[in-house]
Image (cartoon, rainbow, N blue to C red):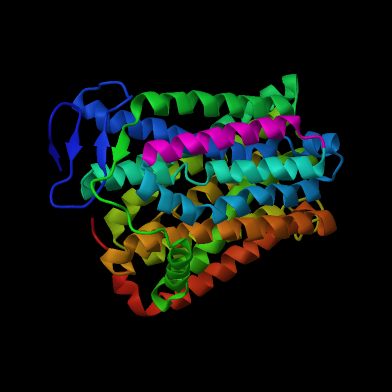
């Protein structure tokens, strides 16, 4: 990559898109790379805010739209389902249309979905809003990753990928105490209006700063069916099976605790107010925001990616069992009963452990030929959110039928089972589990 004229980046010897600064603010060279990445990462922040918002408002949302908290958990699964379905089309469109065009389209859909959520007065209306939000947010992480991959050398891409994830996970901080306060004083619909305003604001910054892309050659005919088939074949391959099976449960468990059931747990089981529940979720949120950077550093120091992933997910499942055991009338039968503070710090430890999940991307990339590494990442991302949709639907039914305690037990068992399968399918290539750099 070499500079060619003011504000232009030319790719040498590759048939790749050429970033152009048309309709964007002229910036110094360093900011031309950093500022667009940070602004696009704010889209991932918005995505995390939206997907974790129900955790702090499930009770009032369900009462207002005429359903139960358990069934509302099922309805929120629509977000993850449509998010997962949008992964491959979003990836194809990013290559064909460029980051700026795709991201602006996604922000527009997200704003419409958030407004639909604010106007929802029935289960169907809420389902439709969640579906729109899932489609709109499906490429919020892919956009900054794609721009970073096209504009940064590999060493800097590794650094920025961790920063993008950490910036994005800060959206969970917004959906804790700040959203609890907003909902408490202005109602849950105000939180969706806030999300719509953020979508419009960040989209405007994207239009001003992120460069447009012009192609240097005609794109091949679109074959989405073939692309989808190849991604599924990679996901089903023996070398990818372990990472895929762990990905299917890992993100689902994290988002279930932080995004849906953590708030009801503190309000219904521990008797906290909404704002107190938001405060109790803050340690977990901080762990999920900072954890990916820490996990990456430990990975580089230990060169033991497979063992790190397996042990951390097993411990995460064990921590959920501790929370379940310490409820009044739980397995300890009159012994120790965990307070709300105890649960908050157990959830913090859970967040620290589950934050190793981004290392699955690195393992998946090292498990496939270099020319197919992009599809390997797409396969993992697809499984992350297919698993989230599946487990969210299952946990919603479990909550309605058996209660919240059983939901947390379910995720503990799911983490243990997927971790053991991961360890089994990666047992013969432990030496490949870490690829330096």
In the picture, the quarter occupied by the N terminus is: top left
Q: Is residue 231 above or below residue 56?
A: below
Indicate the quadrant where residue 50 lies.
top right
Visible residue check, residue 87? yes
Visible residue check, residue 175? no
Q: Position of residue 114 (x, y in %)?
A: 64, 33
Q: Is residue 331 above or below residue 43?
A: below
Relative depth, front residue between 170 and 208: 208
Q: Is residue 428 left or right of residue 181?
A: left
Indicate the quadrant where residue 372 lies.
bottom left
Q: In this view, does 153 lie to the left or right of 384?
A: left
Q: In this view, does 141 lie to the left or right of 79?
A: left
Is residue 168 highlighted in magenta?
A: no
Relative depth, front residue between 328 and 297: 297
Indicate the quadrant where residue 397 lies.
bottom right
Q: Is the magenta stretch mostly helix, strand or loop?
A: helix
In the picture, the quarter occupied by the C terminus is: bottom left
Q: Give the range drawn in magenta.
A: 99-121
Q: Where is residue 386 in the image (x, y as percent from the top left)?
A: 58, 59
Q: Residue, x 37% and y 23% (percent of image)? A: 208
Q: Position of residue 109 (x, y in %)?
A: 57, 37
Q: In this view, does 255 lie above or below 43?
A: below
Q: Residue, x 59% and y 45% (percent of image)? A: 134
Relative depth, front residue between 327 and 226: 226
Is residue 119 highlighted in magenta?
A: yes
């Amino acid at each position: 990559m070499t500079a060619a004229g003011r504000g232009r980046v030319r790719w040498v010897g590759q048939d790749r898109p050429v970033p152009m600064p048309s309709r964007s603010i002229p910036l110094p060279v360093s900011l031309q790379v950093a500022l667009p990445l940070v602004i696009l990462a704010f889209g991932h922040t918005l995505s995390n805010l939206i997907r974790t918002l129900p955790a702090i408002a499930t009770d009032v949302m369900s009462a207002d739209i005429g359903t139960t908290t358990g069934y509302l958990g099922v309805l929120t699964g629509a977000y993850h389902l449509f998010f997962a379905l949008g992964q491959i089309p979003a990836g194809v469109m990013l290559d064909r249309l460029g980051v700026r065009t795709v991201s602006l389209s996604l922000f527009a859909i997200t704003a419409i979905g958030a407004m639909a959520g604010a106007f929802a007065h029935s289960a169907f209306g809420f389902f439709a809003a969640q579906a729109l939000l899932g489609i709109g947010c499906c490429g919020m992480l892919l956009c900054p990753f794609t721009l970073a991959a096209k504009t940064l050398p590999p060493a800097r891409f590794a650094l920025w990928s961790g920063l993008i994830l950490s910036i994005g996970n800060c959206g969970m901080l917004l959906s804790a105490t700040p959203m609890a306060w907003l909902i408490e004083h202005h109602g849950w619909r105000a939180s969706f209006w806030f999300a719509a305003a953020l979508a419009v604001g960040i989209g405007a910054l994207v239009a001003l700063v992120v460069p447009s892309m012009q192609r240097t050659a005609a794109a091949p005919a679109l074959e989405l069916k073939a692309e989808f088939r190849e991604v599924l074949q990679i996901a089903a391959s023996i070398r990818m099976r372990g990472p895929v099976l762990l990905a299917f449960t890992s993100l689902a468990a994290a988002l279930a605790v932080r995004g849906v059931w953590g708030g009801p747990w503190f309000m219904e089981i521990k008797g906290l107010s909404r704002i107190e529940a938001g405060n109790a979720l803050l340690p977990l949120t901080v762990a999920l925001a900072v954890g990916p950077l820490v996990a990456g550093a430990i990975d580089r120091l230990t060169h033991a990616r497979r063992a790190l992933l397996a042990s951390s997910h097993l411990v995460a499942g064990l921590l959920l069992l501790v929370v379940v055991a310490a409820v009044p009338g739980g397995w300890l039968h009159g012994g120790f009963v965990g307070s709300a503070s105890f649960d908050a710090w157990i959830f913090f430890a859970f967040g620290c452990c589950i934050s190793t999940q981004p290392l699955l991307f690195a393992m998946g990339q090292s498990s496939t030929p270099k020319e197919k590494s992009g599809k390997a990442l797409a396969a993992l991302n697809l499984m992350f959110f297919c698993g989230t949709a599946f487990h969210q639907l299952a946990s919603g039914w479990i909550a309605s039928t058996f209660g919240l305690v059983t939901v947390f037990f379910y995720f503990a068992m799911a983490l243990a089972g997927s971790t053991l399968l991961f360890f089994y399918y990666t047992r013969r290539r432990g030496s490949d589990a870490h690829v330096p750099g």
